[in-house]
Amino acid sequence: MKTFILAASAAALAIAASAGIATAQSRDTIQIAGSSTVLPFASIVAEEFGNAFPEFKTPVVGSGGSGGGLRQFCEGTGENTIDIANSSRRIRAGEVEACNAAGVNDILEVQIGYDGIVFAVSADKADFALEPVHVFKAIAAQVPVDGEMVANTYTNWNEIDPSLPDQPIAMAIPASNHGTREVFEERVLHAGCEAAELPEMEEEAMEEACVALRQDVVIEIAGDYTETLARLQSNPDTVGVFGLSFYDQNRDTLKVATMSGVTPSLETIASGEYPVSRPLYFYVKGEHIGVIPGLEEYVAFFLSDQMAGAGGALEAAGMIPAPEEETAEVQSRFDAKEAITADQL
């Protein structure tokens, strides 16, 4: 009797563990969410995929930011969980661990190309030649003065550096739910913080000083770049943070700033010359391959020359293509189902 109970319990556990995968079989449309930067590229691919592969339904692509998409991705397996998370940053070790804890172990990383983060103002405003330290001093909650940290009282950009415009400081930056925010902090705020030569302090206090922002001149945008653009339109003095692709699509109304003397462009980002750029990714739930129709085909189509290659549809939309050999390696790793682990990050 005891043997029967143990066997029944084991069977029940096995059924429970596979229940999520089994229920996924009733869904036949790829579900995608995540980065607002990757959103327009994924939407183009999804539409073209639906046209090119009539045997599959057109994937459904949503936004929610990189962090939000990865949280959904890591909720588990089954028809009520998404298949792909778009991200404008690499997945973090803690996110992989959260995925694993929820039964998502086959996390397949696909790097699709590059994007650049740009600082832009309304087209009729003066030119900005920015350095990371300028941005830090404009929006940090506290700045160093005579060896001490004091409340930031800068009101105009030219007070920070005479070479900057005599324009009131106002910035619209991505909120913490966007991958753009992480790159903004890493490549701009931390770099500017270091250049500002803060007085000595504990490491934790230093980290806080580098990213704590004043509230009187900073607007954090939780939505997509159209919301940032709307902020510039309502307050023309605003400097906004955008993806390069969005700026390219709105050149008639926006003027881009240089950063460390480099103008952001497809060429300067692909070469690494422009300092504020990042690779773009999406993550595929390996457990859903063979269950949700079309996942492998979608990945191959996304990475094809027609879509992600030089001269492809995504370059026309503003994404910087990765070198051919890099894309081939990404496809090879995906085909081999090489899952990413927390130890790799």
Image (cartoon, rainbow, N blue to C red):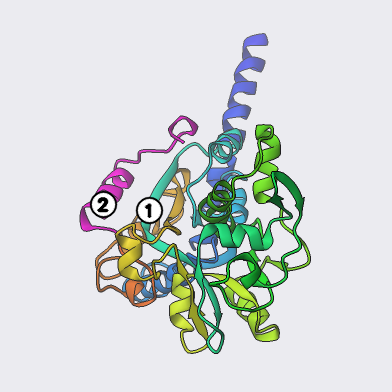
The residue to which callout 1 is attached is 111
Say which mark, if any, is on residue 326: 2
Range of magenta residues: 322-345
Say which mark, if any, is on residue 243: none
Q: Is residue 125 magenta?
A: no
Q: Residue at x 40, y 69 (%)?
A: 264
Q: Mark 2, residues whose alpha carbon is within 10 Å: few (<14), some, or many (≥20)? A: some
Residues 137 and 242: in front is 137
Seen in the picture, residue 303 relative to 169 is either above or below; the reply is above
Q: Mark 1, residues whose alpha carbon is within 10 Å: few (<14), some, or many (≥20)? A: many
Where residue 117 appears, as percent x and y from the top left, is: 48, 65
Where residue 268 appears, as percent x and y from the top left, is: 33, 65
Compared across the picture, whether 19 is left or right of 319 comes to: right
Residues 243 and 161: in front is 161
Three-letter residue code for mark 1: Gln
Q: Which element is circle 2 on?
A: helix
Where residue 17 appears, as percent x and y from the top left, is: 58, 34
Sequence-first disc among 2 and 1: 1
Q: Are marks 2 and 1 in contact (CB under 8 Å)?
A: yes
Q: Residue at x 70, y 48 (%)?
A: 146
Q: Is residue 331 magenta?
A: yes
Where residue 93 appears, as percent x and y from the top left, is: 53, 36
The reply to whether residue 156 is in sight is yes
Query: Which secondary structure is most common in the magenta stretch?
Result: helix
